Amino acid sequence: MRKKDRDNKRESKKRESKEERPQRKRRKKVCIFCAEKFMPDYKKIDLMKRFVSDRGKILTMRSSGCCASHQRAVAGEIKKARQLGFLPYTVD
Ligand SMILES: [Zn+2]
């Protein structure tokens, strides 16, 4: 690829990200603990597994969809489950 082409490509990319990105309507995720009215529990391993990544990290609020108070509870319960060996600290 010639240098000029590459530059043009970069330019158009920059412009796109600044102004012309189509506004997608994202549906707000609803906190499952608020919706179902229960609290996260370290003994429910299958449930808690949904809040860790495949590397064993705790998911962010953004990806878990939890509200602040339940996200805090989830993180605490996952840490408890890790200490008891139900969930891994890391996955290689
Ligand atoms: Zn909640």
Image: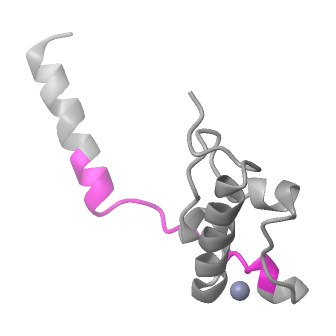
Evaluate whether residue 46 shows in this view: yes
Residues rendered magenta in the picture: 14-33
The vertical placement of 58 against 2, above or below, is below
Count of all numbered marks drawn on residues in the image: 0
Give the residue at x 77% y 50%: 86
Closer-to-camera residue (34/13): 34
Magenta includes 24? Answer: yes
Give the residue at x 89% y 84%: 36
Q: Position of residue 55 (x, y in %)?
A: 58, 39
Evaluate whether residue 26 shows in this view: no
Q: Position of residue 62 (x, y in %)?
A: 55, 68
The vertical placement of 43 against 15, above or below, is below
Magenta includes 35? Answer: no
Name the image quarter holding residue 6.
top left
Q: Position of residue 31 (x, y in %)?
A: 73, 80
Closer-to-camera residue (92/26): 92
